[in-house]
Structure formats: C-alpha cells, structure tokens
Amino acid sequence: MADETMEEGGNPTGVVKKFMYVNRRAPYGTVYPLEGLEVVLIGAAFEQDVSMAFVDDGVYQLKKGQDTAETGMKNFSPAYRALEMYDVEKLYAEKESLEARGLTQDDLLVSVEVLSTAELTELMEQQDVILNY
Amino acid sequence: MKFGIVVNEGPYTHQAADTAYQFTKAALEKGHEIVRVFFYHDGVNNGTRLTTPPQDERNIVKRWSELAQQHKLDLVVCVAAAQRRGIVDRDEAKRHGKDADNIAAGFRISGLGQLIEAGVLADRLVAFGD
C-alpha cells in the first residue's frame, strides 16, 4: 500500500517534481504557517525539488527576534533555521513585500534570495506543484 | 487526467469544502481519476461521523463517505492536523487514551507523506481553501 511505501520517506516512484510552498500569511494569526511548515519538513524526506516563497505578510514568518511568550503561542520560527538540514535550501522572498513592510535581508533569520514579483511569477510557472499556506 | 484533491477548510464554515466535493464528483463523472483526497488544516473536520446537520441541509461528511464507496476513493485525513482538532480513529484513540473515536466511513488517518505522494502521482494537485 502507498502508506507503507511512502510514509517513511524516500522516493520509490523515482519521480522528482518541483514543489513550491508559498507562504503568504503572518506567522501567528492563523495555523496555516505552522501547518505549512510541517508539510515542508515532513515532505523533505521524499526527495523532491523543493522551494519556499515568502510573499505578502508571509515575509513576517522569517522576521528575527520573534517573541510569542505573552500570546501563549509556540514560537516556531527557529524551525526555519533547520530547513537547511532538511535540504530545503531554495528560499525566496518577494522584494515588493519586504519593501512594503520596511524589511530587508538583515531583518530575516535565514538567508533568502530576494526576487521581484515578475521573477517570482516566472519561477512559479516552472513548478509542478504549488501549495499555498 | 489524474487529479489529487486537497481540502483545507472545514465543513459548513467555508465553501471550499463543498467546492472540493463538487469538483471531485464532476471529475469522476467525466471519467477522470482521483488519486487521493487529502484533508488538511480544518479540512480534517470533514471526516467526523458525529456531524449531525439539520435534516433539510446537505450532510457533507456523509456525502464524502458515499462518494468514496461508489468510486473507491482514498480519503486521507492528516494525522497531525487531526490530533490537534480531535479527529481520531480506533487506533489513534487507543494510542492516546481517548474514550471514543469519530472517523467517518471511507476516511482513513495517515501522514503528510500522503499529501506529497498525491502531488507526485497526480497530473494536477488541486487545493481548495483560502
């Protein structure tokens, strides 16, 4: 059964597709960013060509110095630093989204490639699967 | 064409749960293949058999169960999202010491790998939600 072949990871099908995870929401207002990150971390075991894009309020997910102590929420931002260990190395942030929020690369807790909307659009068109969180 | 379906929103609150069903049904009627329907985020709530809507309203959960039976659909509820929201099958209930389970007929609980696999196997992965 599929469950047994793919649940542990690996890539029995041998098919490698381009998966892009698009993160466009602020980190704690909804559960989407946290559960989206869980997909990326679990999905990393399946040997696909993975990238993550951060657009709109999604760029706030990468903001340094997140402190959730008074909200009762778990601060999951350290997990973004672990992405590299999972071989998730293609991280893109949209230039316009960063600028509109007064953010630069220096404000982010991981190194990203900053792309314009047009460049990101082009990259999205090359993807096989886009999951939106 | 082979479609993978992702349902990201709960029943009744959000049209996405209805649209996902209508799309799946229409695709099957047109002769397409549905490799899997994967329920994530609040979408896992589409899989509780304890749903009891008023009698003159559609029963979203039952509708999925019936479609699954007719077409041998693979309806997968994400285990991580399900645990947060209290959707459990017998095994999960036992493992976590719960006094009941609530998974609906035709649904099964499994991991996020099933979502990735659906993306790999399908020609198109279609997600419903915001």
Image (cartoon, coloured by chain):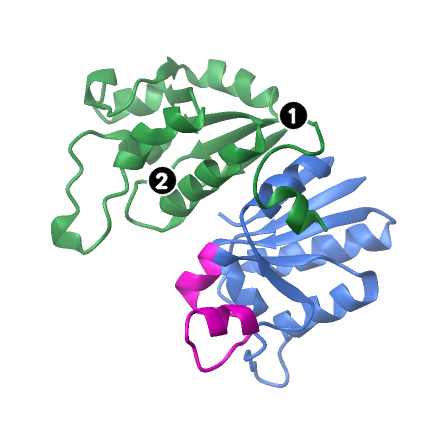
Chain colours: A green, B blue
Give amino acid for label 1: Val
Give amino acid for label 2: Arg
Q: Where B70 sits versus B100, above or below?
A: above
Quarter of the figure with the C terminus of chain A = top left
SS at mark 1 in the image: loop
Whole-percent x, y for residue A102 in the image: 20, 23
Please name the residue shown 70% across and 70% down the image: B65
Please name the residue shown 56% across and 82% down the image: B52
Q: How many numbered badges does the structure rendering display?
A: 2
Nearer to the camera, B14 or A87: A87
Q: Is residue B125 left or right of residue A20?
A: right
Q: Name the chain letter of the residue that bears numbered label 2.
A: A
Q: Name the chain letter of the residue that bears numbered label 1.
A: A
Please name the residue shown 44% across and 63% down the image: B83
> Which quadrant of the figure has residue A101?
top left
Q: Is residue B22 magenta?
A: no
Residue A54 in sight in this render: no
Tell me which label, 1 or 2, sits earlier in the chain. 1
Q: In this picture, which residue range is highlighted in magenta? A: B80-102
Residue extending farthest to the right is B31
Q: Write down the residue under mark 1.
A: A16
Q: Write down the residue under mark 2.
A: A25
Q: Is residue B91 magenta?
A: yes
Q: Residues within 10 Å of mark 1 (few under 14, many from 20)?
A: some
Q: Is residue B61 left or right of residue A118?
A: right
